[in-house]
Structure formats: C-alpha cells, structure tokens
C-alpha cells in the first residue's frame, strides 16, 4: 500500500514534464500560490487527530485514495472521470539557504504531499477541472504571505518558460495564526509581501506570445473566525485522541490527549512511529492556531477581534493593491476576488481536524471563484 502512495507522489513530481506536451489548444495554465487551503490539507476523511488513524496512514496501511462517496459528490457537481493528481511543485533551487534547512524543508514538503494533503480535493484543482485547465500548485502547508515570492520561484521553475494564463494569490490562515495576537501578520506586512511577489512575477514570468493578458487574482481570505463560533461547526462529531468528541471540545484543547496510547503491535518501529506522531499532533487545532482558538477559553468576541480585524484589513489592502498594480504592465491584469471572504461553511464543509476544509468546503470556494470570475470579468 505504501508503494501505491509513493507512486502517487512520483506521478505528482513528474507530471509537469509531460503536462504541457499534452496541453490542448483551448486549455489554460492556472498557478496557485498560498497555504494549506490550496494543497487540500487535511481534507481526506482518513485524516484526524487520532493516533490509530494517523498510524495507518503513515505506515501505508491506509492510502489517501478517492472514495466512492467523494466521486459521487464530485460527479453531482459536474466533475467526472479519473482524478489524476495535479502538478505539485517542489522547492526552487533559489530557495536554498543552507543544506540542513533544504533537507528539512524538502522532507516536510514530501511528508505533507504523501500523508496530509489531498491535492485532488483542493479548490484550485476543482476549479481547473471545471475550466479544463492545467494546474500548478506552488502552495505549501504552513506558509505565510512572506513566502509568496518563494512560491513564485517554484512556478517559474515548474512552468518551464511556458506563459501563465491565471495566477491566484490566496493566503487565508497562517498569517492570522500566532502564539500571541501581537504576532499576527500586520496589514502592511501582508500587502507588501504580496506586492513584492506580484512585481517579481511580472518581471520574471514569460509573457504570452499572442499578446493576451495573464490574469493575477488576489483572493480575499476566508472568514476563519466562524470555525470557532459557528454552532453547526462546533457541534460537528469527530474522532480525536481515541474517542468521539465535538469540534468545540477538540478546539478548546481540553481533551485527554493520550495520543501514544497502548500499542498492541510487537513491532518496535510502530512504537517509534506512534511516539513521533504524538509529538506532532499533540497540540490539536489549538496548537496550529492559538490566536483563533484561544477564544474558547473565555467565549468573548474580544478575543477574536485581532483575527477578525486582521482579515478585514487584509481584504482592504488587497483592494488597494489591485488598484495600484493595475497599470504596472499591460500584459498582466491584477484583479480581486471577494466571494471567498463572504462564504459561510457548514459542518460537512469542515475536515475531521475541525480546522481545514473537506472536499465539500473546497468545492464551495471553487464554485464561488468560478461564478465571480464569470459574473464580473466574463472569464
């Protein structure tokens, strides 16, 4: 089973070498810059804050394949046929700073791709299937807006001098996640990070030979505060730390976290794996985003104010940025997409970690973006 998962990783890493050769005349090339929302992170139903489940994934007994229920759902949304993995771009050599840092980042990227991400469920993949386009994913789990320029380098390498039709910048979670509200990315930092990346892209990307425009989309961050306040989401039943709980109980970081548990396996490597997983997942969703889930300690909306204010300021900053960059280069059109920022999610839209989106939530984003692009920009 592990070989099947590794073969999927190999397919992802090599597809872009032949992807453009099979590129139809009518298809475009979409590139996505962002965080785990854009990698399909934690969207598979097999993933949860549960040691037994995660052990079966990491030891290859449970592969992150597309189940029939998901295929039926996607078919109902007009996406049929096999879900071939998209082009997940690796690190660019221009990101190299130190051998040990490079090895660590490469290892983390590989582990995320194999065991935590489901690129076929990501909004970018679903959008590309709806539009019949080729997709390049430069996004990486845990990254923030200050790494947008590094992701542009991944796209420049992955595109291999092929022009881009559309590039999406979509940072929605990690910039507002911090141990202390004062450490949340400021509006000016967020805007400047994306501004630098866009100018770098325009300067270095290959323009389209037919003179047509490359569209650069600034996607409004999601309203992630609802994860901690929506009664429907908070009452969602999930399995975590060996028992059934609600998302509220998991997010509040008040569960008995005997993650390592009592393994019945006689294999010493199993005990080691469980110990490692215990360290990785011990913090739960609170450990991933204390600034958001600290709200549960008091239930006061004042505790969510830094997050809500940051998201609002990011959206306002993107509006100004789109205006300021509209005339930088006639070959590139910078536009804003507001609809994702207004989406409301139901329990089924949230993954089993009570933090990331399920394939249904990802579909909501894809459909909202597609409809807005058509309504506002006739694309």
Image (cartoon, rainbow, N blue to C red):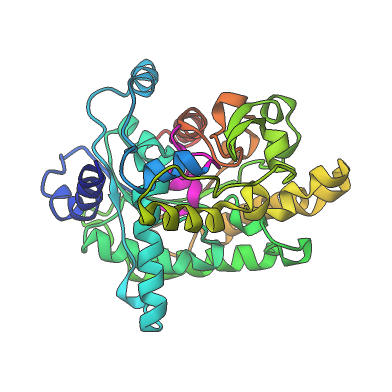
The vertical placement of 11 against 161, above or below, is above
In the rendered image, the quadrant that contains the N terminus is: top left
The vertical placement of 32 against 374, above or below, is below
Left or right for 46, reference 356: left
Place of residue 341 in the rendered image (x, y in percent of width and height, measured from the top left): 62, 40
In the rendered image, the quadrant that contains the C terminus is: top left
Place of residue 283 in the rendered image (x, y in percent of width and height, measured from the top left): 64, 53
- 43 drawn magenta: yes
Name the one closer to the observer, 259 or 271: 271
The vertical placement of 5 against 33, above or below, is above
Q: Can residue 226 be seen in this view?
A: no
Magenta residues span 32-50
Residue found at x 38% / y 60%: 109
Total number of numbered labels? 0
Place of residue 285 in the rendered image (x, y in percent of width and height, measured from the top left): 63, 47
Residue found at x 34% / y 77%: 94
Name the one closer to the observer, 93 or 262: 262
Q: Is residue 193 visible?
A: yes
Place of residue 140 in the rendered image (x, y in percent of width and height, measured from the top left): 44, 57
């Amino acid at each position: 089973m592990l070989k099947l998962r590794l073969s999927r990783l190999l397919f992802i890493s090599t597809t872009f070498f032949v992807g453009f050769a099979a590129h139809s005349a009518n298809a475009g090339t979409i590139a996505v810059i962002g965080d785990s929302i854009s990698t399909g992170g934690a969207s598979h139903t097999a993933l949860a804050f549960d040691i037994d489940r995660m052990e079966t994934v990491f030891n290859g007994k449970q592969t992150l394949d597309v189940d029939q229920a998901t295929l039926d759902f996607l078919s109902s949304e007009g996406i049929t046929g096999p879900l071939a993995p998209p082009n997940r771009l690796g690190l660019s050599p221009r990101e190299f700073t130190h051998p040990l840092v490079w090895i660590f980042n490469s290892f983390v990227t590989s582990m995320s791709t194999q065991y935590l991400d489901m690129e076929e469920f990501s909004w970018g993949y679903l959008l590309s299937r709806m539009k019949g386009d080729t997709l390049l994913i430069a996004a990486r789990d845990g990254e923030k807006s200050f790494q947008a320029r590094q992701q542009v380098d991944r796209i420049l390498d992955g595109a291999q001098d092929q022009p881009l039709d559309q590039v999406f910048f979509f940072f929605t979670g990690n910039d507002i996640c911090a141990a202390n509200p004062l450490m949340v990315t400021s509006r000016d930092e967020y805007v400047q990070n994306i501004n630098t990346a866009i100018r770098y892209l325009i300067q270095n990307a290959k323009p389209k030979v037919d003179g047509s425009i490359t569209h650069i989309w600034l996607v409004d961050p999601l309203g992630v505060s609802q994860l901690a306040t929506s009664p429907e989401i908070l009452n969602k039943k999930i399995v975590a730390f060996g028992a059934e709980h609600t998302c509220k109980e998991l997010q509040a970081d008040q569960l008995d976290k005997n993650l390592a548990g009592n393994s019945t396996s006689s294999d010493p490597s199993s005990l080691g794996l469980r110990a490692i997983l215990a360290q990785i997942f011990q913090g739960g969703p609170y450990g991933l985003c204390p600034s958001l889930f600290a709200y549960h300690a008091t239930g006061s909306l004042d505790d969510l104010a830094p997050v809500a204010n940051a998201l609002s300021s990011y959206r306002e900053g993107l509006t100004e940025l789109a205006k300021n960059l509209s005339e930088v280069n006639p070959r590139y059109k910078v536009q804003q997409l507001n609809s994702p920022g207004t989406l409301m999610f139901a329990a089924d839209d949230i993954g089993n970690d009570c933090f990331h989106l399920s394939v249904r939530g990802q579909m909501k984003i894809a459909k909202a973006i597609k409809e807005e692009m058509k309504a506002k920009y006739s694309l």
